[in-house]
Amino acid sequence: MARPTSSGCLLVFAALLIGHFQASLQLVIKKVDIPTSVRVGEEYVILDCDYDLENTSPMGLVVKWYLNGYYLVYQWIYDKVPGAPDPISKYIDLQYKASNDPNTMYRAMKLMRPDIDLTGNYTCQISTFQDEVSTTRPMTVYSTGQENEFKLRSKKTNDGVEVTCGAVGLYPKPTLDITVEGFPDMQSSRPIITETPDGHYNIDSYLALEDQDLPDSAVINCVLGIPSVNYNATKKLVHYPSGNSAGGMRTSVFVILMNAAVFILLGY
């Protein structure tokens, strides 16, 4: 078996040394902080991508943020001021500094008063002349609508009650269910969902009940949900079927109290 020559050993050593040198120059993303969800109207949200240049020179350093893979929303070139294109620039605070380190100070995006159009997958890309790294995370900006626009109403009929529930200005797609406590079979059918031109959703549901099927006091719930962000809100009302003992008792007590008040006023 032939023994390796000195020149061959030198080549192997040189290759290992170059590989080690290149590895030592690699960029490293240390931490990514992108919230999975944020509510519309929050004062601000920060998307951060902390990295370490290791032994890489900052020359040629560029930080870019992309939305949904292709839309460049933020860029910082080392030793220059950051920038953002329209129309997303209205959301971005270009004065925000994530650190005082000149190599990382403008690495993050500060989004002011986020709205639903900022929902998507965010990619943080760090590059230099020697290397490039990136990572992607999703973020949903959700809307729960206005509290006073989430309404539960009831209307008595000859033999029962009609219950309607609705909400407007929601995002992403919501759910809505009307139920009667203690009666799992009494629930609304699939709600009607409509999408508005600005991308929000309105939702409505309906349930008709017969008094003969209900207890003396029926607690009716309407549950609004946005499953993708684990949001839930509930409205309640109590329906007293016509002719039940509870309703009659309240009427009798009211009449007795009114009669007592009249007798007192007349001096009896």
Image (cartoon, grey):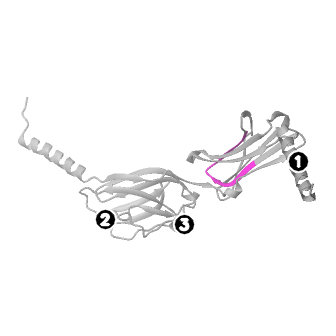
At numbered mark 1, what does the secondary structure look like: helix, strand or loop?
Answer: helix
Q: In this view, does 80 lie to the left or right of 267?
A: left
Q: Tell me the CA gap for discs 3 and 2.
A: 29 Å
For the residues carrying marks 2 and 1, which lies nearer the camera in this image?
A: 1
Q: Distance between the residues labelled 2 and 1?
A: 79 Å
Closer to us: mark 3 or mark 2?
Answer: 2
The answer to whether residue 142 is magenta is no
Vertical placement of residue 84 versus 154, above or below: below
- The residue that label 3 is drawn on is 87
| CB-based contact (under 8 Å), mark 3 and mark 1 | no
Residue positioned most to the top: 1
CA distance for labels 3 and 1: 68 Å
Residue 82 appears in which quarter of the rendering?
bottom left
Q: Is residue 142 left or right of residue 1?
A: right
Q: What residue type is labelled 3?
A: Pro
Q: Main secondary structure of the magenta part?
A: strand
- The quadrant in which residue 182 appears is top right
Q: Mark 2 points at which residue?
A: 101
The residue under the point 82% across, 33% down is 213
Question: Which amino acid type corresponds to the residue marked 2 in the rendered image?
Answer: Asp
Mark 3–mark 2 CB contact (< 8 Å)? no
Dot 3, crowdedness within 10 Å: few (<14), some or many (≥20)? few
Q: Give the range drawn in magenta.
A: 165-179
Q: Which mark is residue 220?
A: none
State whether residue 156 appears in this view: no
Q: Mark 1 points at which residue?
A: 256
- Within-10-Å neighbours for mark 2: few <14, some 14–19, many 20+: few
| In the displayed structure image, the side of residue 63 where residue 166 appears, left or right | right
Place of residue 221 in the rendered image (x, y in percent of width and height, measured from the top left):
71, 43
